[in-house]
Amino acid sequence: MGARIRADRLSLDVPAFLQRDRESSGWGGLFLGAAFDPPKRKLLRLLDNISFELREGDRLAILGRNGAGKSTLLRVLNHVYQPSEGKLTVEGSCQALLNMSLGFNGEATVRENIYLRGIAMGQKASFLRDQIGQILEFSGLGEKVNHRLRTLSSGQKMRLGFAISTCVQHDIMLMDEWVGAGDADFMRKAKERMQSRVGGSKIVVLASHSTGLLRDICNRGIVLERGRLVYSGDITASLKYYHELLAKLRTGELIEPEAQPASGGAQIFGAVEEILLERDTCVIRGWFIDTEGAVPGGLALQVDGQRYGADTIERMRRPDVMRHFGLSSDNCGFRATIAVPGMSRLSELGADVQVLGGESPEHASAPLRIAGSVAALLRAAS
């Protein structure tokens, strides 16, 4: 059986009871206001017109700041919430690692809770009966099998929930952050099992703030902001958009959904962090990548409409850029030398100088961002 997820204009409204703002001079006024001015019921839209489609082989990262709707969307995909509008199609068996304590009862024993949580996940009692031994062994709770759940520590409960949740390989895996709890030995086993389950799943959907983890696992990404899907693309482009989104939000800029990126090839972006002049040769340091996560091979300098290709490009390690964008390699920094005949002073570059990136110096056409300190130096020099 194949696996597929199709979200078609999904929206989710939930009821909330809101109290009208009012001033009170004391406790008496506060209690009278609560008695005669009860909260009003209002529908809040948590997800707004979200559409995407996943097929076998897709590993989707859900990006967004806290409160953007990541966990809510995962719960809609797992049928915890039914969408208020739109249509959701999920084909294939689904495993959700969202709430490790789902179905647990503190007064029931560990053995009984294996049945309770397993049945809450849709498993049959006959199947769970055969899984009890390996669940207890994996979680290290064999000696606690007849103890009430409330006597266990929070770490032991998490280990039990993880062992039950991952005892079966499913077609689709939904995860809210990378799950793990316990001592070093259990963390090692948990990581190995998670990697196995992710590798064996036909579709993976992961919400996390760890860009490195998302870059390692996912090949696609969507960005949510206030319940709206504002960007969808490959994982590197999505991570780039997400970091730019955070920068815009810090300045109070209004965010609107972006049109889908054209399929006409990868886009190149990067930054110039230093420009020096050694005789008639410019030495430029910075970093650049494309939206597929690859490092371009060409660089050029444009001065007063005249282009000069790089003579040499030395690759530099940039682990900070790798972590920021979730890249698989840190070999994205560069130190380039570009000869500009007749130039004797840095001021001759002018404030409108551009550094361009591309697959080769001849095809370099994507302007790299010039750092503020460099731009200020060029303006001062001119």
Image (cartoon, helix red, strand yellow):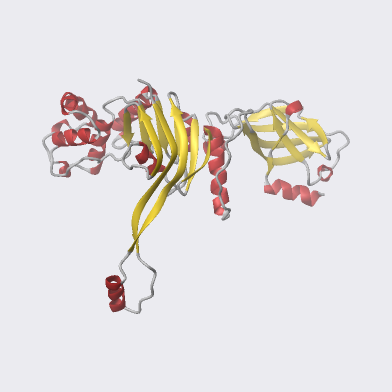
Task: Give the total number of marks visible in the rendering.
Answer: 0
The residue nearer to you, when weighing 226 against 250, is 226
- The residue depicted at 20 percent of the width and 27 percent of the height is 137
As rendered, which of 5 and 288 lies closer to the eye?
5
Determine if residue 200 is in view: yes
Residue furthest out toward the right: 342
Please report the residue visible at 80 percent of the width from the left and 32 percent of the height from the top: 308
Depth check: give the residue in front, 335 or 242: 242
Quadrant of the rendering where the N terminus is positioned: top left
Give coordinates of residue 99: x percent, y percent. 29, 40
Percent x, y for residue 274?
70, 41
Is 11 placed above or below 196 here?
A: below
The quarter holding residue 361 reads top right
Which residue ends up furthest to the left in the rendered image? 146
The residue located at (28%, 39%) in the rendering is 100
Q: Residue 89's quadrant in the figure?
A: top left
Q: How far across and down, in percent of the image, does residue 219 sit? A: 49, 29
Classify residue 345 by image quadrant. Answer: top right
157 with respect to 263 (left or right) = left
**Is residue 144 visible from the viewing direction of this image?**
no
* Residue 354 placement (x, y as % from top left): 75, 40
Q: Residue at x 42, y 32 (%)?
A: 6
Which is nearer the eye, 4 or 128? Answer: 4
